[in-house]
Image (tube, rainbow, N blue to C red):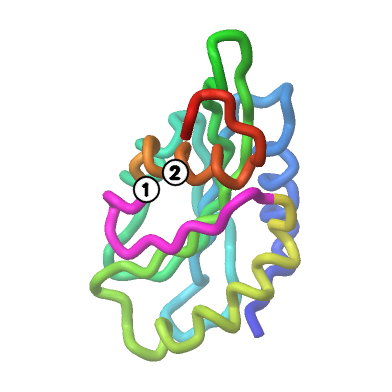
Amino acid sequence: MADVSDTKIQEAYVDVRSDKSDTNWLLLDYQSDRSDRLVLTRTGTGGLSELRDALDDSKASFAYARVTYSNDKESQREKFILVVWIGAGCKVMRKAKISVHTADVKGVLRAYSIEVAARERDDLQEDPIVVRLRKAGGASYDGI
């Protein structure tokens, strides 16, 4: 089991979900290589591009992000994604535990439209994620 009891995680989650906050992503990392305790390491206001820059290729991390997109000419939507990051240099034992720990993280970062499994930064390009969000959202009026 992953330890997700850090109160800063819940506070950041509420901040990302808030319409009154500019914060649109958070990043959770393991406290150390041998620890199963997750801690809040960063938050940001620069969207998926800023989040991509914050990821470490040697780590496994979890991120939660608000994605804003136009559904048509007249409206904007905000949806949330859960990112499970496994960098190319992540240690084997950490990779082995990530699926079990994902369930624990989902207990804290509860409300999201899609889960994104990311192995490289390009997996977090905004356009393909928006396409997935539109499909997950049901009604689509633009033929996607």
Q: Secondary structure at mark 2?
A: helix
Q: Position of residue 134 (x, y in %)?
A: 55, 38
Q: Residue furthest top?
A: 74
Q: In the figure, is residue 25 to the left or right of 124?
A: right
Decide which of tag 2 and tag 1 comes sooner along the chain: 1
Q: Position of residue 84 (x, y in %)?
A: 48, 64
Q: Residue at horizontal 49%, vertical 46%?
A: 132
Dividing the picture into quadrants, the one containing residue 110 is bottom right
Q: Pointer 2: residues within 10 angstroms few (<14), some, or many (20+)? A: some
- The kind of residue tagged 2 is Ile
Quadrant that contains the N terminus: bottom right
| Residue 114 part of the magenta-drawn span | yes
Q: Residue at horizontal 67%, vertical 26%?
A: 21
For this rendering, which residue is in front, 85 or 136?
Answer: 136
Q: Residue furthest front?
A: 143
The reply to whether dot 2 and dot 1 touch (C-beta < 8 Å) is yes
Kindly identify which residue carries mark 1. Answer: 124
Residue 6 disc label: none
Looking at the image, is 59 positioned above or below residue 140? below
Q: Position of residue 120 (x, y in %)?
A: 28, 59
For this rendering, which residue is in front, 61 or 32?
Answer: 61
For this rendering, which residue is in front, 143 or 37?
Answer: 143
Q: In the figure, is residue 48 to the left or right of 101?
A: left
Looking at the image, is 50 positioned above or below residue 31? above
Determine the CA span between mark 2 and mark 1.
Answer: 7 Å
Q: Residue at horizontal 44%, vertical 30%?
A: 46
Of badges 2 and 1, nearer the viewer stands 2
Q: In the figure, is residue 124 to the left or right of 2?
A: left
- The kind of residue tagged 1 is Leu
Q: Residue at horizontal 63%, vertical 79%?
A: 2
Kindly identify which residue carries mark 2. Answer: 129
User: Which residues fall within the magenta stretch?
Assistant: 112-123
